Image (cartoon, grey):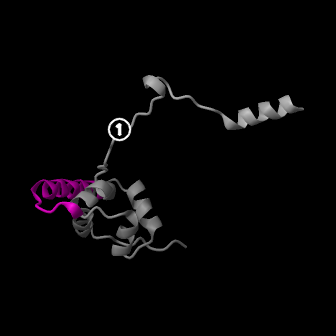
């Protein structure tokens, strides 16, 4: 016999979701299993919308704080982890005189040498 559905306060869900929690963290906050949260996100449109809206509001708040912060170290870390920001440095490799890089396939060279020796 299935267990009765555990009620989750949707107003509290909206508040908690602004902190951009993982689904595991939501399960812990509401004292339910991860599978319960996964099922609700998958099957309950209102539940999913509340979580997504809360996470969106949390990201907007983080962007605002990042813009206004005097000491952005912690905010930059969170921005990379929560907003997908990343450090990027383009690296180009070229061969002699700007030409293509010469690639030597060591395994192929060894096998060709071994067959020539036999």
| Residue 20 seen by the camera | yes
Residue at figure coordinates x 79%, y 32% from the top left: 113
Location of residue 58 in the rendering, given as x and y in whole percent from the top left corner: 21, 58
Q: Left or right: 57 with respect to 113?
A: left
Span of residues in magenta: 51-74
Residue at figure coordinates x 26%, y 55% from the top left: 79
Indicate yes or no whether the magenta region holds residue 118: no
Indicate yes or no whether the magenta region holds residue 69: yes
Instruction: Classify the position of the N terminus by image quarter.
Output: bottom right
**Label 1: how many Cα within 10 Å (few below 14, some 14–19, many 20+):** few
Q: Left or right: 92 with respect to 79?
A: right
Farthest residue toward the right? 118
Farthest residue toward the front? 97
How many numbered callouts? Answer: 1
Q: Left or right: 116 with respect to 45?
A: right
83 is higher (above) or lower (below) than 22: above
Location of residue 33 in the rendering, given as x and y in whole percent from the top left corner: 45, 71
SS class of the residue under badge 1? loop
Front residue of 108/58: it is 108
Instruction: Classify the position of the C terminus by image quarter.
Output: top right
Residue at figure coordinates x 30%, y 54% from the top left: 80
Location of residue 77 in the rendering, given as x and y in whole percent from the top left corner: 27, 60
Residue that carries the numbered disc 1 in the rendered image: 90
Front residue of 99/18: it is 99
107 is higher (above) or lower (below) than 79: above
Q: Quadrant of residue 19?
A: bottom left
Residue at figure coordinates x 38%, y 63% from the top left: 23
Majority secondary structure of the magenta segment? Answer: helix
28 is higher (above) or lower (below) than 78: below
| Residue 30 seen by the camera | no
Location of residue 21 in the rendering, given as x and y in whole percent from the top left corner: 32, 64
């Amino acid at each position: 016999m299935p267990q009765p559905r555990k009620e989750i306060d949707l107003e509290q869900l909206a508040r908690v979701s602004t902190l951009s929690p993982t689904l595991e963290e939501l399960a812990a906050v509401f004292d339910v299993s991860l599978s319960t949260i996964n099922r609700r996100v998958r099957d309950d449109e209102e539940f999913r919308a509340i979580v997504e809206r809360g996470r969106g509001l949390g990201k907007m708040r983080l962007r605002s704080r990042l813009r206004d912060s005097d000491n952005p170290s912690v905010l930059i870390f969170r921005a990379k982890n929560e907003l997908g920001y990343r450090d990027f440095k383009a690296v180009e490799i070229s061969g002699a005189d700007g030409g293509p890089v010469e690639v030597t396939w060591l395994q192929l060279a060894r096998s060709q040498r071994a067959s020539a020796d036999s």
